[in-house]
């Protein structure tokens, strides 16, 4: 079962996710939206990613949802706010509102997080290339995803050195702002310096050739992908009709 | 007709105080290995950039004189034609990886992908390159996690994969250990046998002497000496222009001077053994 | 001079985008080491906008949030803010605002106001006014004094945008002014920052 989701074509997963986001945002109420979290958790478990999904969700979405609840229910003043203690008041309107907001954050965030956890950038970009997106677009996406972790690794040494020398974390704001320069400056210099030769190297490997790119890597679309995409499209049409009809 | 021809070529980088190269003229014939020698900043890389058309396509400014490839001015070539005509490998192995590939095989294929080559043809070419540069053990490794020397070999493979008739190698061995250096020079010899024209910037003078046909010695942006390797690299004047001579050559030049002889001077150890080995020096 | 998307997205400018995003991330890590109470996460976007112009700046802002959003989807809606920051900062570079200190200071304000104008509606529409960031304390404080939600969020947005943009702009500006001329000259929007005048040939 684990392989099933891995074998899905990126655009099939994207269709599923888009459908979930649109339905989540435009369906009234909050039950369906909250229900999407267990659904995507299940889909993540099917992809062998359950724990990672659960932890990632808690750390990124969990706090946001909690804060929104507390502020909407106890702090924002609505006409029906009942004073409880000091600056704290309880409001049924606020409770309603926070359920509406947080349930939509939960549904959209579950879908997006699931997508990026079960789809590798490589597959995503391959699908984009096959969909004839400009080479420059896929290049920027892929090179950014590749470069960030490398630079973080490289900067770790710089930062450790600065920390051990004891940087200004106490002094006034301006002194702290100034300490950015010696730490980021050398990093930026070396990165900018490399762009020139990198540009030339890419050119000598036909980056600017005006022909459609091919790919040594290969990812196949199966029947199941077409089925999923068609079903998602049909469901979307049904949903739009339902929402407009009412 | 020369494959590469420079006539009275001059160029100054934007904001430069003086010309990077000045009145440079030379020709390279098909199948020749031409070594560009000279101190750092003497204009070697600038000449490579002119041949590849990076000047003035990438570096702004107006070159003077004329650069021709196969009898056609380089400015008349378009980007794809230039890629297919001139393969170019750079000094720094770290900036030569595409940055968008997670294994060596695809890294090598990148130029072919950009040229729209079909998958099967591509796979065959890539396998041939992996064989040629002995990359089998790292074919599935991430190019960004390789050592400098390994990356340089991958970079050379990634350039040769399109099978260009002209190959520019700008200090290809500066990051390599002696064994890999030897490998690169074996590839240069192979390219020569395949009839390719090679422009080589290289400091390891003993190897240059063994493998190159033509030598251009640059000094301060000008051609100080040029001609067949055998003639230039046995001329003590090379030392006056900031160049180096092979060890063996220097030994025999000294010997001739000391003993007042006028014996032919060998370029390499093999050469010396062939000439003097039996008699003893 | 010919200007257009094709001109702006030269290969060299394209290579600036990952550099900008990486610098954003490192800048953000640094700001937490330096214990700043606000997010300093757009130094790279600013820097790239100055050298690459409005469109490259916009894409840098977008890519930063996309990369971040892959791990933390809450960041996605704020891509709009980063895109605005990059775009406006790039426009000001085209108009040569950063060539002197007065222009650079004025740029801080223009960029922060533009960012706040986009940020407040996003915060309200998507998150109902609070997102769990440190600056929410300020919003909450304003709320308990009886200020309306919209006013509170806007005040917080303006305040945090001015503070963080001032730092983003000044750090990237100082570093830009230290770049050697031979780097600057190669970028489409770099020539105004070149100090030395080319010697006549």
Image: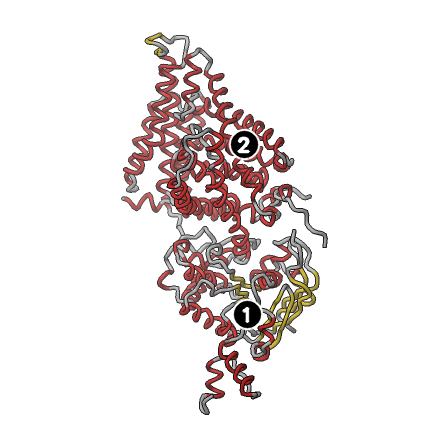
Q: Secondary structure at mark 1?
A: strand
User: Mark 2 belongs to which subunit?
Assistant: C
Label 1, on which residue?
B198
How far is the residue under mark 1 from the one under mark 2? Answer: 49 Å
Q: Position of residue B47 (x, y in %)?
A: 61, 63
User: In this rendering, is residue B118 above or below B179?
Assistant: above
Crowd tier of the residue under label 1, counting other residues whose Cα lies within 10 Å: few below 14, some 14–19, many 20 or above: many
Disc on res. B137? none
Residue wearing tag 2:
C84
Secondary-structure class at tag 2: helix
Residue C26 in the image, given as x and y percentages of width and height: 44, 40
Name the image colouring: secondary structure
Residue C50 vs A196, above or below: the answer is above
| Residue located at (34% from left, 27% from top) | A63
Q: Is residue C121 visible?
A: no
Taking the image as shown, residue B245 lies to the left or right of residue C29, namely right
For the C terminus of chain A, the image quarter is: top left
Residue C115 in the image: state x and y as whole percent.
53, 28
Quadrant in the rendering for residue A50: top left
In which chain is the residue bearing label 1? B
**Quarter location, residue C112:** top right
Picture quadrant where residue B215 is located: bottom right
Q: Residue at x 62, y 73 (%)?
A: B226
């Amino acid at each position: 079962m684990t392989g099933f989701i891995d074998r899905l074509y990126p655009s099939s997963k994207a269709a599923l996710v888009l459908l979930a986001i649109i339905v989540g945002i435009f369906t009234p109420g909050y039950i369906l939206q909250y229900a999407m979290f267990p659904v995507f958790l299940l889909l993540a478990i099917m992809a062998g990613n359950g724990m990672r999904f659960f932890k990632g969700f808690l750390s990124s979405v969990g706090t946001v949802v909690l804060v929104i609840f507390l502020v909407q229910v106890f702090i924002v003043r609505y006409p029906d706010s009942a004073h409880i203690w000091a600056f704290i008041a309880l409001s049924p309107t606020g409770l309603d509102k926070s359920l509406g907001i947080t349930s939509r954050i939960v549904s959209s965030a579950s879908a997006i997080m699931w997508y990026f956890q079960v789809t590798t950038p490589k597959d995503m970009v391959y699908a984009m290339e096959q969909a004839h997106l400009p080479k420059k677009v896929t290049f920027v996406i892929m090179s950014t995803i590749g470069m960030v972790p490398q630079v973080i690794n490289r900067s770790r040494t710089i930062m450790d050195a600065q920390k051990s020398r004891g940087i200004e974390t106490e002094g006034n704001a301006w002194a702290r702002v100034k300490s950015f320069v010696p730490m980021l400056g050398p990093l930026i210099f070396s990165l900018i310096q490399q762009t020139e030769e990198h540009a030339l190297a890419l050119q000598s490997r036909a980056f600017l050739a005006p022909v459609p790119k091919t790919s040594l890597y290969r990812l196949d679309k199966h029947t199941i992908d077409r089925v999923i995409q068609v079903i998602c499209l049909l469901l979307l049409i049904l949903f739009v009709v339902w929402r407009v009809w009412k | 007709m020369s494959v590469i021809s420079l006539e009275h070529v001059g160029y100054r980088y934007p904001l430069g105080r003086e010309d990077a190269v000045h009145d440079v003229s030379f020709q390279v014939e098909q199948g020749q290995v031409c070594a560009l020698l000279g101190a750092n900043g003497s204009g070697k890389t600038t000449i490579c950039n002119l041949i590849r058309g990076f000047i003035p396509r990438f570096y702004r400014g107006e070159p003077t004189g004329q650069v021709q490839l196969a009898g056609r001015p380089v400015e008349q070539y378009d980007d794809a034609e230039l890629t297919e005509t001139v393969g170019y490998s750079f000094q720094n192995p770290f900036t030569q990886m595409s940055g968008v590939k997670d294994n060596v095989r695809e890294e090598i294929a990148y130029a072919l992908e950009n040229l729209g080559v079909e998958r099967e043809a591509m796979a065959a070419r890539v396998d041939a390159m992996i064989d040629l540069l002995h990359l089998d053990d790292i074919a599935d490794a991430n190019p960004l996690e390789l050592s400098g020397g390994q990356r340089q070999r991958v970079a050379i493979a990634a350039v040769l994969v399109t099978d260009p008739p002209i190959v520019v190698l700008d200090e290809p061995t500066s990051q390599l250990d002696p064994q890999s250096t030897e490998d690169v020079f074996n590839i240069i010899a192979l390219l020569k046998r395949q009839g390719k024209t090679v422009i080589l910037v290289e400091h390891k003078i003993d190897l240059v002497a063994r493998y190159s046909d033509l030598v251009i010695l640059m000094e301060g942006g000008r051609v100080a000496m040029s001609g067949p390797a055998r003639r230039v690299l046995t001329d003590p004047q090379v030392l006056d222009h900031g160049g180096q001579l092979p060890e063996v050559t220097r030994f025999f030049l000294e010997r001739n001077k000391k003993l007042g002889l006028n014996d032919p001077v060998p370029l390499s150890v093999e050469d010396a053994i062939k000439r003097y080995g039996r008699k003893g020096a | 001079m010919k200007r257009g998307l094709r001109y702006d997205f030269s290969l060299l400018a394209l290579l600036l985008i990952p550099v900008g995003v990486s610098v954003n991330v490192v800048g953000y890590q640094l700001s937490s080491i330096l214990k700043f109470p606000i997010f300093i996460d757009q130094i790279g976007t600013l820097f790239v906008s100055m050298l690459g112009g409005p469109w490259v700046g916009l894409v840098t802002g977008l890519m930063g949030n996309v990369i971040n959003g892959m791990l933390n989807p809450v960041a996605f809606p704020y891509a709009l803010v980063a895109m605005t920051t990059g775009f406006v900062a790039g426009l000001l570079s085209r108009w040569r605002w950063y060539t002197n200190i007065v222009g650079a200071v004025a740029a801080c304000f223009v960029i922060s106001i533009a960012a706040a104008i986009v940020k407040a509606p996003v915060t309200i529409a998507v998150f109902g006014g609070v997102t769990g960031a440190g600056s929410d304390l300020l919003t909450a404080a304003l709320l308990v004094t009886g200020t309306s939600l919209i006013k509170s969020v806007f005040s917080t947005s303006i305040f945090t945008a001015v503070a963080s943009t001032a730092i983003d702009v000044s750090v990237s500006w100082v570093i830009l002014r230290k770049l050697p001329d031979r780097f600057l000259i190669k970028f489409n929007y770099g020539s105004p920052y070149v100090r030395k005048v080319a010697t006549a040939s």
